[in-house]
Amino acid sequence: MENLRLLIPEIVLSAMALLLMLAELFIPRRHSRILLHLALLASAAALGTLGLAASNPAVYQGAGSLWVVDPMSLFFKVIVLAATILVLMLAVDARRDDDAHLGSFAGLILLASAGMMLLVSAVDLLMVFLSLELISISSFILVGFERGDIKSAEGALKYYLIGAFSSALMVFGISLFYGATGTTHLLKPVPQFGYASSALFLLSTLMMLAGFGFKISMAPFHLWVPDAYEAAPTPITTFLSIAPKAAGLAMMLRVFTKLIPHPALEMTALFSFLAMLTMTVGNLTAIRQNNIKRLLAYSSIAQAGYMLIGFVTADAFGREGVLLYALAYLFMNAGAFAVAIAIGNEEGYELEAYDGLAQRSLGLAVVMAFFLLSLAGIPPLAGFVGKFYLFGAAVQSGFYGLAVVAVLNSVVSVYYYMRVTYHMFFLPPRATAPAQMGLYLYSGLALAAVAVILIGVYPEPFLSVVKSSAEMIP
Amino acid sequence: MPILSLTTFLPLLGGILILFIPKERKDAIRWVGVGSTVAAFLASVYALTLFDPGLASPAPLTLQMVEKLSWIPSFGIHYFMGVDGLSLPIVLLTTLLSMAAAIYSMNIEERVKEYYFWFLLLEVGMTGVFCALDMFLFYVFWEITLVPMYFLIGIWGGPKKEYAAIKFFLFTLFGSVFMLLGMLALYFASNPHTFDMVELARSHAVFGREFQIIVFLAFYLGFAVKVPAFPFHTWLPLAHVEAPTGVSVLLAGVLLKMGVYGLLRVCYVILPAGFEWFLPFLVIIAFINIVYGALCAMAQTDMKKMVAYSSINHMGYALLGMAAISPTGFNGAAMQMITHGLITGALFILVGVIYDRAHTRDISAFGGLGAKVPVYAGIMSLTCFASLGLPGLAGFVSEFLCFLGAFPAWKLYTALSVSGILITAAFFLRMLQKVFMGPLNEKWAGLGDMNARELVSVLPLTVLTIFLGLWPRLILDIMNPTLTAMTKLFPSLFQSVR
């Protein structure tokens, strides 16, 4: 019990989540938005406790029995909470059928976040599995939250079936791992090199990789992504495209570059291939999408592919690249989805809804163009700095083929990102009224825009944070 | 005073100011737009008065008006600006052409606010590219030019504007991402790691020959698309023709120079062994550009397309001069950049003038306009003569220097390339004949001559064309010391052409 203090942020968050679900019963439906505000407060409080942990490493950082709190896990916990806060802000102003069950909605988001925060700290495969299940089960419900919408139900069901399948795969992998090594605890000195040639050990690693791959939408395990993303309420799409992906990547960074380093297993070529496949498949499929949510869904697959570069190099530089990219990705993707919500509230999610946006709301169109250009990696925006770091890591470690595939992918991605600007700037508008936005949506959008430009123009403070956050225990 | 930053960022200030003007007040927006380009031009002229051409030394890159601030210390990246005899004339060309194009663009009626915002942002990127001396900064400015250009072509362009805009964007980005990889390779190969062009130039000796060749090719892809060097030229006719007049001026006048400038500034100075290896291919590409570009231009019936293809031909001269690695050749190449910018910039404006009135650019649709619009006919003829290389006008001097420089080293290709001049003369004269001579096509009886706006935008270019033709030392005196020093940088390399 003595290292329970390491878990204070998670405890705060989970307690608030349960409270919110309970509070729903006592708050009249017309005031139920207050529950979203309470969830925002809870996330902010958890963020505060993270600040405490960062400022007092001697007391609030260290190794627990199944988890560690180190600079890297703190960094990703901040990313997860920032995503949660942004998503809750978007959720306040997103259109819903009714305001029923907002308490469960907010509570589930918080529970999923708590799961992600546990995941980035996990050093035991059992813990990894449990936190992944906490995330998945909350997400299944959230995807199907629009109960009146048959599509939402379909997407949730697909997501659930594939999610259950991937969990089974992962559990099987973990049990094989236990069979090969006699433990699920990754901090125990595992004689990796002795097992590298053991078929059992390799098989278990591959099955775990496949299971994790589903969660971070790595090709060829990405097929559930567009359906689930399209079906989910848009704030949840935003959430799913950022937070679980960042958390899953963080966990994989810990497992596959530190605890069971893939170079020792001679699986680097496999990782390199998976990275190339993920970005290429994501980008090529995105070209043909006419729905903004599906387009951004495929784009998010490609973005995960770029981040996998940091796994391939498996050194500090690559790891820092992943951290930086996750930070940039948080803001640019949340920003793009915020615009999608602003437009989607009134006009739906087909690309035609964006026709002539520049002549209706120039500011909104320009900001959306910025987010898309940032996702494409055009300087001086955040996405470019992230790509610069990751591509730099690839070049430094001599993965030239990977670097070339990655830059060619950025060129391809410009084509479909610019399809949105084509609708916004080049086509005549269908309506003349400017797009309407609520205060929360507006603030979320402004926050994301400022961050995307700031990280792009003056990246130094972010780089130094990333550098000091790339350390792991042990 | 940080004069280079002022030159670069004054247009940005204007652009931000424009964002705060309501879009109904079109005239205010236009005047702020033009005013910002004028301010940038004046700042660059002031930089010229501060510049001392004699300071060039054999050390790589002797720079003046240097500004160096730490920007991203984690990577040793600096905000590093400076000019020498190679870049300062191009900076002046950029601000001058931007001013001319901004004045010409005052006739734009549609979405004026957005137009001038993107236009000014484009000027920031263009000026920055020629002042930046840190690779990272260079790349940032390089890419900044892409986005405004995409919007300028895509919103205000001709019938196929959307396709032209995305093709331009993808082509250029395709080239520049390889440049990014080249940059990263240089960074990790240098010791200590740096993006500083001056440091990299000093340490070129530590890069092995194989390494230099590969990195050279990566950079070459980026620059060749911009030049555009055969076979990466296919975006050019489309983009130039579809772009609105003011933007065509900048595309041809400045953006193409980014490629040639990059070859001299980065490839030659930092990767001399790669450059040496590539020279035989460069000469062949220059030859193809000259002859193929000219032949393509000859086959056009659309005036704007003809001028666009003639740009490919003219950039071929610059590549040919560069391949000589001699003071004469380098001076020719650098001056060709300036004269082509002035002359072709003026040509695009003039083609725009007639298109605005007649709504056609078909050469055979006109006839006998010489008596109808004498001022226009005079300026157009003079500019065409300058472009085809008539002695006494600016184009002749630079083309002559390119050939003169290249001949001792590449006799065969230089001799073959001279035919390009002949073809150029043929298609320009044919156009002049069909448009201005013969009986007046009655359809154009109501055609008016040039108005004040058009004259103000084109006359500075015309005057400079005549002036530089008569007194080329005006510009050669600025460039020559730097370029001569550059040719002496690598005494042991380039033996085949010395």
Image (cartoon, coloured by chain):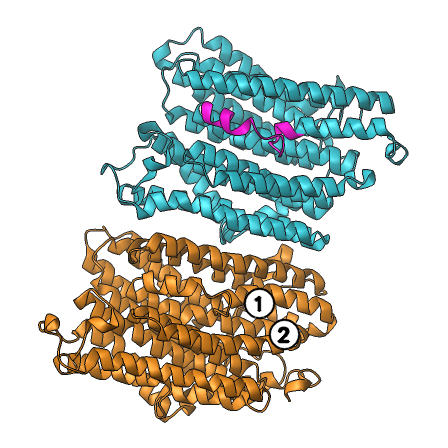
Please give the name of the residue rendered at 33% of the width and 71% of the height, measured from the top-left corner.
Answer: B300
For mark 2, name the chain.
B
Q: Which residues are magenta?
A: A213-232
Amino acid type of disc 2?
Phe
Amino acid type of disc 1?
Tyr
Please give the name of the residue rendered at 55% of the width and 12% of the height, measured from the top-left corner.
Answer: A18
Give the image quarter of residue A351: top left
> Which corner quadrant holds the N terminus of chain B?
bottom left
Give the image quarter of residue B165: bottom left
Q: Is residue B183 shown left or right of residue B395? A: right
Query: Disc 2, disc 1: CB below 8 Å?
Result: yes
Q: Is residue B316 shown left or right of residue B493? A: left
> Which corner quadrant holds the C terminus of chain B?
bottom right
Please give the name of the residue rendered at 23% of the width and 50% of the height, measured from the top-left corner.
Answer: B22
Q: Nearer the viewer, residue A319 or A430?
A: A430
Residue pushed farthest top? A25
Task: State the mark number for residue B220.
Answer: 1
Q: Position of residue B232 (x, y in %)?
A: 50, 65
The tint chain B carries is orange
Q: Position of residue B45 (x, y in %)?
A: 37, 78
The tint chain A carries is cyan
Task: State the mark number for residue B278.
Answer: 2
Q: Is residue B467 visible?
A: yes
